[in-house]
Image (tube, helix red, strand yellow):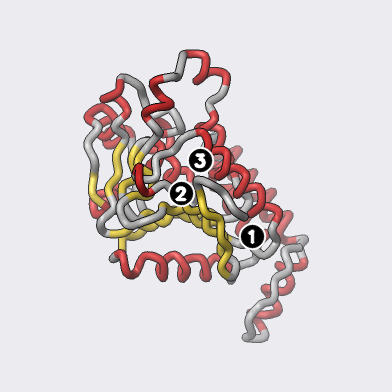
Amino acid sequence: MEYENIVYVKEDRLAYIVINRPEVRNALNQAVLDEIEDALDWAERDDEAGVVVFTGQGEKAFAAGADIQQLTEAEALDALKNGDMQQLYDKVEAFQKPTIAMINGFALGGGCELAMSCDIRIASIHASFGLPELALSIIPGAGGTQRLTRLVGKGKALEMILTGKMISAEEALAVGLVTKVVTPERLRAEVEETSAGILSKGPLAVQLAKLSVHMGAETDMKTALMLERLSQAVLFNSEDKNEGARAFLGKRKPSFEGR
């Protein structure tokens, strides 16, 4: 697929969505959001795409927030009627296939919020994270106030949001904002190895594990445990469950078919 603001490329079973505006540190405008959504739709329909990886072009930025020029034109009803960025990131979080943020540089504002909507976040040691929106007299409005709180806790989230301070990759790892930090040279290989580990598992189990974790985190324990039990019931009736058990007993690699 060819786009003006992103690059969509598939390598083996990994579908890469690369924000391609390095001249503005991969800032996110409406055109970028529209193209990301279109690329996600392609990845969802592509049976050969098992993991979706988000990253930014170049070495400086994953995505350095929203395009400020568009912000100057925004009015109150735009946030209420559209909420395009928030809706897109909800779609990323709920995406059936696993998603990984390969964070190669600045992840600020909407870029940090995009990373937080992914299942796994792997960062370069040179990456930086922050939600500086309050300096513009707005708030993080694409899930930042909620996802950051759930990832790092209320106290750290309030500190980052109210002060707008950027944190390093090492601090992001320490507070749970990212799952792994590696050298820039190692970043892509780490993403590929993590993806390979996911892709070796039963795809139905991966999908229902995602569902159980994401939906369970938003409800009470009793309801979440019932969701977990129902997901397990579906898997117990799948052909992949039988294949996984037979492969384990036969000491061979399983051949899952997603059914």
Seen from the viewer's position, the closer of residues 62 and 125 is: 62
Q: Is residue 77 toward the left or the right of residue 144 in the image?
A: right
Q: Residue at x 39, y 21 (%)?
A: 72
**CB-based contact (under 8 Å), mark 3 and mark 2:** yes
- Please tell me whether residue 238 is drawn above or below residue 66 in the rendered image: below
Q: Is residue 201 toward the left or the right of residue 75 in the image?
A: right
- Mark sitting on residue 34: none
- Please tell me whether residue 80 is drawn above or below residue 247 in the rendered image: above
Q: Is the residue marked by circle 2 packed among few (<14), some (14-19), or many (20+) residues within 10 Å?
A: many
First in sequence: mark 3 or mark 2?
A: 2
Distance, label 1 to label 2, CA atoms, is 30 Å
Q: Residue furthest top?
A: 76
Q: Please, what secondary structure does the residue beneath circle 3 have?
A: helix
Tag 1: amino acid:
Ala
Q: Is residue 245 toward the left or the right of residue 154 in the image?
A: right
First in sequence: mark 1 or mark 3?
A: 3
The residue pinned by badge 3 equals 32
Seen from the viewer's position, the closer of residues 233 and 125 is: 125
Distance, label 1 to label 3, CA atoms, is 32 Å
Q: Is the residue marked by circle 3 packed among few (<14), some (14-19), or many (20+) residues within 10 Å?
A: many
User: Which quadrant of the view contains residue 244?
Assistant: bottom right
The residue pinned by badge 1 equals 205
Q: Please, what secondary structure does the residue beneath circle 1 have?
A: helix
Q: Please, what secondary structure does the residue beneath circle 2 have?
A: strand
Seen from the viewer's position, the closer of residues 82 and 100 is: 82
Q: Residue at x 45, y 33 (%)?
A: 143
User: Which quadrant of the view contains residue 151?
Assistant: top left
Q: Position of residue 230 (x, y in %)?
A: 69, 48
Q: Residue furthest bottom?
A: 251
- Mark sitting on residue 19: 2
